[in-house]
Amino acid sequence: FYSVMIGTELLNARRDDAHFPFVNRALLSRNWEHAGSMVIDDKPALMENLFRMIAAEEGSVMFCFGGIGATPDDYTRQVAAKVFTDGKMAIHPEGEKILRARFTGEMTAQRLELVNFPQGAELLTNVVNGVPGFYLQERFFFVPGFPQMAHPMIEEALERFYPTGEVKYRKSLIVYASEGAMIDLMQRIPPEVEFSSLPNTDNAVREVEFSFAGYDEPLLERWRQNFCDEAKRKGFDYKII
């Protein structure tokens, strides 16, 4: 899962980013995790390169915030079309119905552009003003930059397509030693175990938190025990957490 926030207003601090913490909580509550999160300038070439990079990863899912309006500085719809549908765009029929009902007697060509999406796009519900977001391939989701509009769309997407992931386990311990004292054992950890080593930054205290995560709980338990045994063998105190 990737989240992409588009807008100079975030980079120059005119607005605070509310999207990453929201998406992170929504993912974790469903046993998913971020693979990456980026805040970028709304430059088409940069957006295109990033979309292509994420799309190239097998099974990737992207939530993209911002730039789907109809003003000259909104490029997201066009860039998404270039990356995902060879540049082909079309007025979404259901989207047009929603807009005509919303702007009765005030429909303009500019407003119609709000539902000019990459060909084959499907809609995400806007609970604030009805103007929809969209998604492609049930993997790539494009929503407005306004949190009150965007966040219900992300919830809708997750509930429909990614309601829950496989439970991921984590086992941790603290060893009262330096990282280097355990380096030989660290090098033998298998790739299916997600491993982290977090030393205490207070130079007066020598301790490291070792953490093992993954989907095979007995394997994680074995590796935590391996570290306990190694600490004991070398005469270091440790604490399971």
Image (cartoon, rainbow, N blue to C red):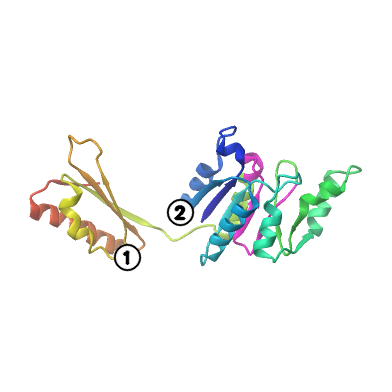
Circle 1: is it few (<14), some (14-19), or many (20+) Cα within 10 Å?
Answer: few
Front label number (2 vs 1) = 1
Q: Report the residue that reaches farthest toward the top.
A: 14
**Mark seen at residue 96:** none
Residue 226 in sight in this render: no
* Amino acid type at mark 1: Pro
Reading the image, the residue beneath label 2 is 33
Which residues make up the magenta segment?
131-150
| Viewer-nearest residue: 8 or 185 | 8
- What secondary structure is found at the residue carrying circle 2? loop
Instruction: Pinpoint residue 148: horizontal percent, then vertical percent.
Output: 64, 39
Is 149 a magenta residue? yes
- Which mark, residue 191? 1
**Looking at the image, which residue is at 51% across and 65% down?**
57
Is residue 133 visible to the viewer in this orientation of the structure? Answer: yes
Q: Is residue 87 shown left or right of residue 184?
A: right
